[in-house]
Image (cartoon, grey):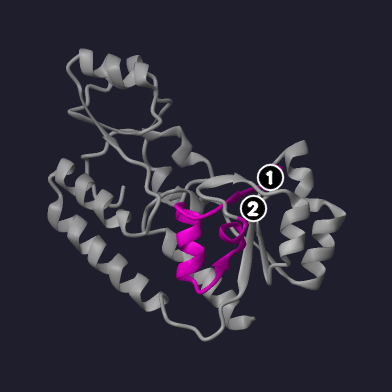
Amino acid sequence: MMLAAPGQLISISRISHDPNVSVMLEQALEYPINHGQGEEVFRLAPDLVLAGAFTSPYTVGLLRRLGVEVAQLPIVNTLDAIPENLREVGRLLGREAAAEAVIAQFEADLAALRVLRDHVPRAALHYANNYTSGENSLAHEILTAAGFTNIAAEAGLSGGGTLAMERLIMLMPDLVISGQSYPGASRSEEVLRHPAMEALRTRHASHALADAEWVCGTPAVLRAIARLAALHEGG
């Protein structure tokens, strides 16, 4: 949606219409969605299908056997990889100049947010089921770019995983960043409201950030960095 020329994009994933995870919801509502099914996508007669690393191998294989070009983009785990993905999508769409313009703006904005700070608070990412993100993850890079250290790294966690609540509390972070609560009820989210976590939040700063700004490697991560940087300055 950032790079395609008018009329070039004919369908997008149903996930893009989910307000909990879509970073371009208003723009996405202008496009018809698909559910990632091979037969469904084939009927659209596309010249190119952009898929992800976790797209169903059956769907990818079926489309390729039917003669449809499918390009699979890798999962982005670093801020430096975002321009690489943008550049590749620009090449696939024949929109290299548009991609370079987006990349230049992204790199300039990121450099402006990555200022050196004398004080580096310790922060904890805390989600449902005590899930967190350590080193070698996009969330970790977002956190450190905003001037925080990640306590999951102190605990030796690499990538995503769980950090026991008792361990998190013993590490005593300066800031607890919780995931957003979703509609409905889920036992996995009860840890976000556990009395021990509530006490930790009362003693230290706490904030919830929208998951949409964290989950995908696009320039939208700048919003998450900017919000965290504002918390840093305010704290």
Q: CA distance from mark 1 to mark 2?
A: 7 Å
Q: Secondary structure at mark 2?
A: loop
Answer whether residue 117 is magenta in the image: no
Looking at marks 1 and 2 on the same chain, the residue that comes earlier in the sequence is marked by 1
Residue visible at 15% across and 46% down in the picture: 91
- Regarding residue 40, the answer to whether it shows in the image is no
- The label shown at residue 128 is 1
Residue visible at 67% across and 69% down in the picture: 175
Magenta residues span 128-155
Label 2: which residue?
Answer: 179
Residue 12 lies, in percent from the top left, at: 36, 35
Is 182 placed left or right of 48 in the picture?
right
Give the residue type that dot 2 points to: Gly
> 80 or 43, which is in the foreground?
80
- The label shown at residue 74 is none
> 44 or 149, which is in the foreground?
149
Residue 179 lies, in percent from the top left, at: 64, 52
Is 175 placed left or right of 191 in the picture?
left
Mark 2, other Cα within 10 Å: few <14 / some 14–19 / many ≥20: many
Quadrant assignment, res 126: bottom right
Residue 36 lies, in percent from the top left, at: 39, 25
**Image quadrant for the C terminus?**
bottom right
Is 77 placed left or right of 166 in the picture?
left
- Regarding residue 205, the answer to whether it shows in the image is yes
Residue 121 lies, in percent from the top left, at: 61, 75
Residue visible at 78% across and 37% down in the picture: 187
Circle 1/circle 2 CB separation < 8 Å: yes
Q: Secondary structure at mark 1?
A: helix
